[in-house]
Amino acid sequence: MNVNTPELEDVAPVTGEKGRPVWIWFLLGILFGITLTEAEVISWFRIQEMFRFQAFHMYGIIGSAIAVAAASNLLLKRRKMPTQLCEEPAAIAPPKTGWGRRYWIGGTIFGIGWALTGACPGPLFALIGGGVTVMLVAVAAALAGTWTYGYLRTRLPH
Amino acid sequence: MPEFVSHTWPWYVAGPIIGLFVPLLRLIGDKRLGISGNLRHLCAAILPGRIGLFQYDWKKSGSWNLVFLLGVTAGGFIGVRLPGTHDIAISPETKTALAALGIHDFSGLVPQEWIGWHALLTVKGFVSIVIGGFLVGFGTAYAGGCTSGHAISGLSEFQWPSLLAVIGFFAGGLLATWLLLPLLAGSL
């Protein structure tokens, strides 16, 4: 299996900087945060329910979100797809192995953290807003984790 | 107001709304949904060290996303204040399983016994919050995305790397749920 790792190369920044006013992103973020909260995606209990396969709720949310996003992408096909993954342009491209090790190793590490905190990055911040202020510590720890990855990056398998 | 507003939003309402953020962000500003990129932007903005991963113009590429994240935080603040019951209606099987781990209070968004300022210096609180948070930051940076960036954005683009990452997410989550949480439950 050969896995493309386009985002590890020196990709250009997202094209089409349209310079939208900043409040648009804030409003969209609010809608996103309200949705995560009202559907209980930010609940530690829901994440446990998901990892124990005891309800359809989270699978329905993630599955229908992917379906709607994929359908939208197909409808908008003529527009050029953003090529990067989560990352913004990388400064250093570590050697490629073609096995996508970073994805499943990194993914597994994140998965452990997801189940331990009961929150992925978006919900961590929504929880802080929702009054679970101890998640400020989790965010600080997450920043330390991201920084540590940056520090060790060239020595890790990718 | 529709009936669901005062209850837990069902998956078929919340899922499509979340999915619509992919075309919305794309159409409005050619942006790609991905929350964990913000951890990198924040590192670039506030943490010291000449590290390649953080040497870029975070204001130019990340400002929109950091503002989006601020909105998500505000959304949590508003969400918990919206009218309606906020008793988590998790399945009875999950309640039974969690009770075996010593979790009996199912009110709120997190288990009071494990997660909170008072629990931070207990073994299970520290591991859940500090170690868990660290692994979230390390793992998402390593994998280049989180639930939004890989599971929603990536899978909706049929990206192989994202499928590998999402398989990893679940492998790790299952490992922690079935192996680590029982161990932690026995700790102080």
Image (spheres, coloured by chain):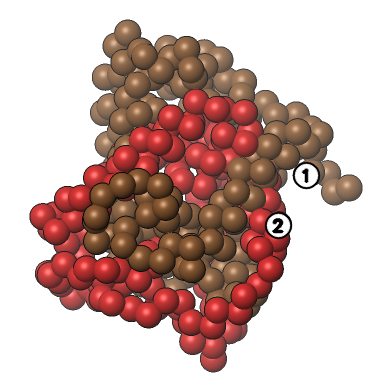
Q: Position of residue A124 (x, y in %)?
A: 50, 39
- In this figure, which residue is indicated by the disc labeled 2? A27
Report the disc number at residue B4: 1
Please, is residue A3 above or below residue B104 in the view?
Answer: below
Query: In the image, what residue type sits under mark 2?
Result: Leu
Q: Which sits in the foreground, B137 or A116?
A: B137
Q: Look at the image and give the colour of chain A.
A: red
Residue B51 in the figure: left or right of residue A155? right
Q: Which sits in the foreground, A128 or A69?
A: A128
Camera-near label (1 vs 2) is 2
Q: Which sits in the foreground, B119 or B183?
A: B119
Query: In the image, what residue type sits under mark 1?
Result: Phe
Secondary structure, mark 1, is helix
Q: Look at the image and give the colour of chain B.
A: brown
Residue furthest to the bottom in view is: A78
Circles 1, 2 touching at the beta carbon (< 8 Å): no
Q: Position of residue B19 (x, y in %)?
A: 59, 63
Query: Is the same chain shared between marks 1 and 2?
Result: no
